């Protein structure tokens, strides 16, 4: 890209005309010119990966398998290593020309240029024409003749200025400048060639490492191959493309350089790697410590390990190491060139495997009906679900839905809940082994709430299990955990049990579930005439019954996530529209309405019902949630059992689930706020708020939290600290509404 700021005549005309004509020829022949695209890696069998940056679309990853690769990646200007060269205002000479020609920015008014090569003279002339005072310090005695102010055989001996360049020392004098430009020659960009297994040689005349051997299917041309003059670069490119005849450009001058590598015994602090702050003394220390391999030098000093991967520093560093160890630069060698050439976003590497394409958003069978009713859809646990209904203010709508469900009846879509069947003679054994609560003694037709634990004893998921028959269980797990629960059951089925005697089957997509909750729920179910007796003796809480609806099976489970009498109606997904239509038609007579997930979250929090991953964290065990019975009573093995009896599990200071209340009229506590004791510097976190809502039923905020030794702090008033402000709250039972559970049977 140097033509953009250095310019040049090609084939007798402006380079822009030549570039446009070449592009037109390429595109007319069916080729493609890809701008804003970086080829960042060459892999096996000449696979080239390229990152295209696109303005209106996500960036793209291109995987190209060409028959022939021509690497014409140019070169990078290498700085001279002078004392105190880490000051603001010290930059490469070519960068100053880029600022001037591409952005019309003059980097300084009094500019010093230190060099050992001819490429800085066009830079000096351009800066001088733009109004800067320019002085060139050329370390060569035979620097080219010019009208510029040039001191030959002079090196910069130091940079003066604490927060910027105020002056430089050169030729034994202090010279007032505000900018120092450095050019120590050019380093060919050979990364892609080296990634294709190319080897390098040191060219004394160019003071650079250049490609050594030809590789089948890979050619290198231009500055990447050491051609730093325009005519020679064009000649090489012409030949690499199969051109015949004379070079397509007139001579453009020659490039001369005299190596000026870092001298190990040079005084002052001399930075080699500006990103990782590696100095010449760091390289010398590495050599003294025996790290004389360039790979060891890189890791000992972090030279070349920053985001630029040593593009400006590696060659200076290996030259210094060569001098310190008495070897040539070629003998010292280079570190391995690995892709990517530039940092590439992980999303680009993932390509299409991102967002919904790698983790598809799951959708309810009734999504269209929810939208028609004004549902505001949000993502929960990978499912798109109704958050609330209607165009009203969200807080007002959510409060209204929650209050209506408490006072009368609410309908919410529970189809996203997992429905995994465990089937076979050993179904009870597999269910027991995966559950904290024993399930083998559950009677057919009954339901039991419980946990699955990780091997560490941490709560993995919660939900209810239905025993459909002696050899058949239905695990109703959390919506967002269905895939992981299924994977876990299948893993242990194959690892610990006879796969011929038990199978697991995910039926989540085959069944849809509509839940009716509230004091009028039973009346509404009765009005639907589903052929099931609803008295407490025939269908008690935590039991289910089977019947038929519209010629299909229906399962009516009396189970609650709200603390009110509730019924889950599960039918084949193809029948759920008809079922919902009948419910919606009947519901107004009972004062009912639709209930979104946000309203449901209020209802469950009022009862202290948890959401795993929200009201638990990576340390929460069942007894922290007040459920210690199976831990004390079960003698058989189950996942996580041993971890429940470790010293950590029995620590008296464990965080336990509690309720957090504050005075009526106050706003809800901020979720995530720390529960604290003490004040000022003595303030200490005891835990944090996990759930917090305004409760329409209680007329006051309701909250849950995990608090250190929380069960022993009942009635204690604590601070709740958030973003620099502290409030007061009282620790109490997680069950803020109906602690006796009367509403379940009302």
Image: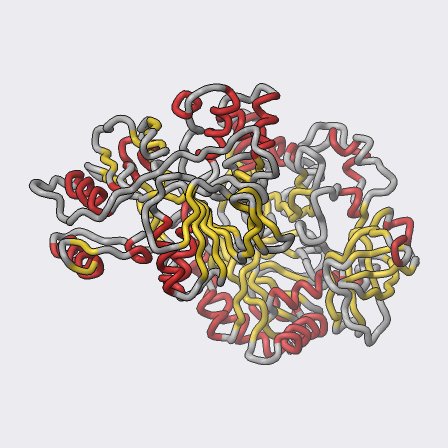
Query: In the displayed structure, does residue 572 sit left or right of residue 594?
Result: left
Q: Is 273 placed above or below 418 here?
A: above
User: Horizontal and vertical percent for residue 231?
Assistant: 20, 46
Spot occupied by residue 133 in the image (x, y as percentages of width and height): 45, 61
Foreground of the two, 346 or 464:
346
Pick the residue in front: 386 or 6: 6
- Please identify the residue farthest to the left as the structure is shown: 245
- The image shows residue 254, relative to residue 641, as above or below, that is below
Q: How was this image coloured?
A: secondary structure
Q: Reply above or below: 368 against 31.
A: below
User: Which x, y percent locates residue 24?
Assistant: 15, 58
Residue 679, image x and y in percent?
90, 58
**Residue 421 in sight in this render:** no
Q: Quadrant of the C terminus?
A: bottom right
Residue 350 in the figure: left or right of residue 633: left
Left/right of residue 708 with respect to residue 264 in the rendered view: right
Location of residue 574 (image quadrant): bottom left
| Residue 650 seen in render | yes
Quadrant of the rendered image containing residue 410: bottom right
Q: How many marks?
A: 0
Name the side, left or right, on which 630 lies relative to 273. right
- Whether residue 24 is situated above or below residue 664 in the rendered picture: above
Identity of the residue drawn at 84% across and 67% down: 662
Residue under the image location 70 percent in, 34 percent down? 456
The residue nearer to you, when weighing 562 against 382, is 382
């Amino acid at each position: 890209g140097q033509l953009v700021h250095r310019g040049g005549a090609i084939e007798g005309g402006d380079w822009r005309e030549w570039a446009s004509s070449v592009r037109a020829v390429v595109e007319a022949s069916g080729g493609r010119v890809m701008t804003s695209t970086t080829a960042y890696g060459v892999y096996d069998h000449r696979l080239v990966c390229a990152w295209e940056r696109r303005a209106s679309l996500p960036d793209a990853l291109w995987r190209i398998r060409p028959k022939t690769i021509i690497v014409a990646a140019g070169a990078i200007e290498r700085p001279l290593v002078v004392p105190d060269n880490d000051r603001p205002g010290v930059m490469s000479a070519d960068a100053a020309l880029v600022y001037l020609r591409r952005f019309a920015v003059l980097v300084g008014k009094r500019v010093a240029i230190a060099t050992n090569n001819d490429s800085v003279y066009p830079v000096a002339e351009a800066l001088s024409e733009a109004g800067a005072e320019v002085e060139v310090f050329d370390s060569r005695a035979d620097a080219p003749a010019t009208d510029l102010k040039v001191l030959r055989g002079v090196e910069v001996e130091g940079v003066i200025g604490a927060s910027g360049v105020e002056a430089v020392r050169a030729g034994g004098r202090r010279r007032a400048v505000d900018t120092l430009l450095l050019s120590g020659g050019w380093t060919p960009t050979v990364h892609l060639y080296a990634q294709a297994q190319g080897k390098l040689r040191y060219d004394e005349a160019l003071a650079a490492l250049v490609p050594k051997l030809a590789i089948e299917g890979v050619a290198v041309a231009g500055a990447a191959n050491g051609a730093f003059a325009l005519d020679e670069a064009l000649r090489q490119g012409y030949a690499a493309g199969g051109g015949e005849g004379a070079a397509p450009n007139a001579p453009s001058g020659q490039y001369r350089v005299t190596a000026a590598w870092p001298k190990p015994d040079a005084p002052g602090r001399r930075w080699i790697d500006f990103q990782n702050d590696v100095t010449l003394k760091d390289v010398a220390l590495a050599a003294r410590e025996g790290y004389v391999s360039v790979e060891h030098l890189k890791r000992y000093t972090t030279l070349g390990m920053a985001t630029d991967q040593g593009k400006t520093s590696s060659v200076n560093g290996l030259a210094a190491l060569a001098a310190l160890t008495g070897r040539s630069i070629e003998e010292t060698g280079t570190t391995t060139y690995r892709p990517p050439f530039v940092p590439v976003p992980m999303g680009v590497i993932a390509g299409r495997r991102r967002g919904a394409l790698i983790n598809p958003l799951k959708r309810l069978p009734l999504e269209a009906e929810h939208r028609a009713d004004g549902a505001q859809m949000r993502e929960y646990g990978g499912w798109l679900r109704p958050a609330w209904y209607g165009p009203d203010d969200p807080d007002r709508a959510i409060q209204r839905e929650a209050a209506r469900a408490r006072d009368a009846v609410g309908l919410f879509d529970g189809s996203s809940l997992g429905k995994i069947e465990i089937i076979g003679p050993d179904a009870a054994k597999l269910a027991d082994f995966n559950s904290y609560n024993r399930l083998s003694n559950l009677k057919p037709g009954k339901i039991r709430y419980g946990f699955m634990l990780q091997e560490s004893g941490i709560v993995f998921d919660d939900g209810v299990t239905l025993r459909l028959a002696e050899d058949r269980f239905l695990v109703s797990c959390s919506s967002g955990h269905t895939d992981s629960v299924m994977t876990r059951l299948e893993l242990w089925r194959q690892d610990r049990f006879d796969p011929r005697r038990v199978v697991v089957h995910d039926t989540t997509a085959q069944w849809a579930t509509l839940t009716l909750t509230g004091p009028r729920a039973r009346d509404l179910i009765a009005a639907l005439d589903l052929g099931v007796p609803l008295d407490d003796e025939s269908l008690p809480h935590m039991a289910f019954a089977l019947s038929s609806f519209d010629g299909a099976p229906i399962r009516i489970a009396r189970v609650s996530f709200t603390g009110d009498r509730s019924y889950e109606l599960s039918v084949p997904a193809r029948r759920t529209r008809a079922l919902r239509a009948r419910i919606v038609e009947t519901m107004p007579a009972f004062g009912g309405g639709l209930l979104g997930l946000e309203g449901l979250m209020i209802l469950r929090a009022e009862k202290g019902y948890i959401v795993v991953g929200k009201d638990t964290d990576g340390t929460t065990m069942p007894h922290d949630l007040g459920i210690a019975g199976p831990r004390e009573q079960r003698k058989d093995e189950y996942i996580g059992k041993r971890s429940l009896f470790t010293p950590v599990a029995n620590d008296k200071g464990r965080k336990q689930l509690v309720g957090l209340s504050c005075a009526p009229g106050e706003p809800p506590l901020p979720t995530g706020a720390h529960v604290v004791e003490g004040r000022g510097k003595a303030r200490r976190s005891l835990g944090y708020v996990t759930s917090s809502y305004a409760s329409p039923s209680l007329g006051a905020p309701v909250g849950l939290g995990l608090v250190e030794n929380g069960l022993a702090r009942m009635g204690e008033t604590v601070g709740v600290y958030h973003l620099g402000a502290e409030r007061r709250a009282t620790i109490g039972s997680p069950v803020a509404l109906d602690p006796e559970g009367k509403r379940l049977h009302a």
